Amino acid sequence: MFVYYLHYIIVSLVSSLSIFKLKNTKYIAVVVFVLLVALAGFRGQVGRDYTLYIKYFNALTSDNFDYFGNKFLFYEPSNYALPYLLKLIFGREYFIQLCFLLFAFLGVYYKMKAMEMSNSFFLSILIYLTNFYLLHEMVQIRAGIASGIFLLSIKHIYNRNFGKFLLYILWACFFHYSSALYLFLYFLSPTSFNKIWWIVVLSSFSILSLLGINIFDLTVLSFIPKIQAYIELMKAGGDFVLINVWTSFAFLINFLLTFFLLLKSSLLIDKNKYFIILLKINILSIIAYMSFASMPVFAARVSQLLGVVQIILFPIIVYAFKEKIIPYTIIVFISLSFFYYYFIQLDFFKPYYTWIQQF
């Protein structure tokens, strides 16, 4: 696990230089970008879903596979088009490895480009590095790209430009059909905010969740192929049961920090013009996790797709305290806690090696 530890330390230290070298942030970002793409793009079979993607890439690009038949609605176009193009250009021997590199490049690029909306590049990197980077770029590679594209589309929600927003979401759907749910977020007002109303809404869902009440039965949406597949998978594994979301470390961190920002919203609302829309979306990510608790995998995926806004939202906490050491300490602690959670407690990844070693 030494590679992961070293990578975390180097990326954290390099990105922290942006605190002292604000004018050089773009150069620091390039170094961080290369480090992040390298770890994810050149990894071997060190995490979940890796072999599944190899199976998909091989199957979808085989000569006898009819993608435009009855498979189009189940497999996103990116699953077929990008591997097929890389296979056509580079041949059968290397195209799968290059797929992982390309997906890592796009996932990291879109998210780091979106960090231009953040109040702190360093804090955004810390939040990204030990949570969404590990989940998206190292495991759920399609969701990683789609969520990054969504982050960039938030500017168009704020500017009320539905045409450009729609184009971004359609591009996100190219990688992950679940991105269609982002369309509903356009109807959230990016400038008006009723603090009391959102406190009541979040508190109400929290009480229902704490009481163990099944808020939403996902089976009513079983006519959607992807959701039906999730339902069948959960039933087969015996996991189609109501879970206690309050035992989730990631959920608790998200809930506590979001509720704190909600309480401090009057103070923070002028510190970042995207604060209102980011906060609303993240509250919805919490509500989604509680609402779909009867289907843990689906609940987690929807919550993560919405919760990616934390990369930009949480650094705003620096304006909630007079002493800046406090918010920086909070984010660093959360980052280290996530690192411990994934690598020590869950043992989420296998020892690191690169696919280059196979040649």
Image (cartoon, helix red, strand yellow):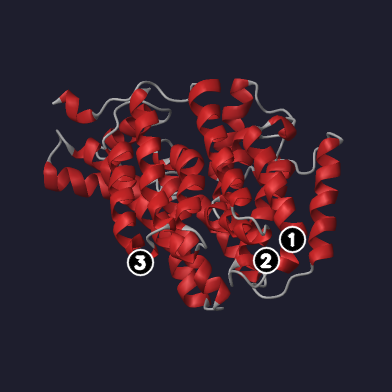
Horizontal and vertical percent position of residue 304: 57, 45
Q: How busy is the neighbourhood of tag 1: few (under 14 within 10 Å), some, or many (20 plus)?
A: some
The one of 288 and 88 positioned closer to us in this rendering: 288
Label 3 amino acid?
Lys
Asked whether the residues under the numbered discs 1 and 2 touch, taking CB atoms below 8 Å apart as contact, a structural biologist would say yes
Q: Earlier in the sequence, mark 3 or mark 1?
A: 3
Apparent side of residue 122 relative to residue 300 in the rendered image (left or right): left
Q: Is 58 drawn above or below residue 84 in the view shown?
A: above
Residue mark closest to the camera, 3 vs 1: 3
Q: Is 212 drawn above or below residue 309 in the view shown?
A: above
Horizontal and vertical percent position of residue 98: 22, 41
Q: Quadrant of residue 174 in the image?
A: bottom left
The one of 35 and 322 positioned closer to us in this rendering: 322
- SS class, disc 1: loop
Give the quadrant of the N terminus. Answer: top left
Label 2 amino acid?
Leu
- SS class, disc 3: helix
Q: Quadrant of residue 294 in the image?
A: top right
- Residue at the spot x=65%, y=50% of the render? 285
Asked whether the residues under the numbered discs 3 and 1 touch, taking CB atoms below 8 Å apart as contact, a structural biologist would say no
| Pointer 3 residue | 23
Residue mark closest to the camera, 2 vs 3: 3
Residue 192 visible in the displayed image: yes
Apparent side of residue 267 relative to residue 348 in the rendered image (left or right): right
Q: CA distance from mark 1 to mark 2?
A: 6 Å
Callout count: 3
- SS class, disc 2: helix
| Pointer 2 residue | 268
Q: How busy is the neighbourhood of tag 2: few (under 14 within 10 Å), some, or many (20 plus)?
A: some
Label 1 amino acid?
Lys
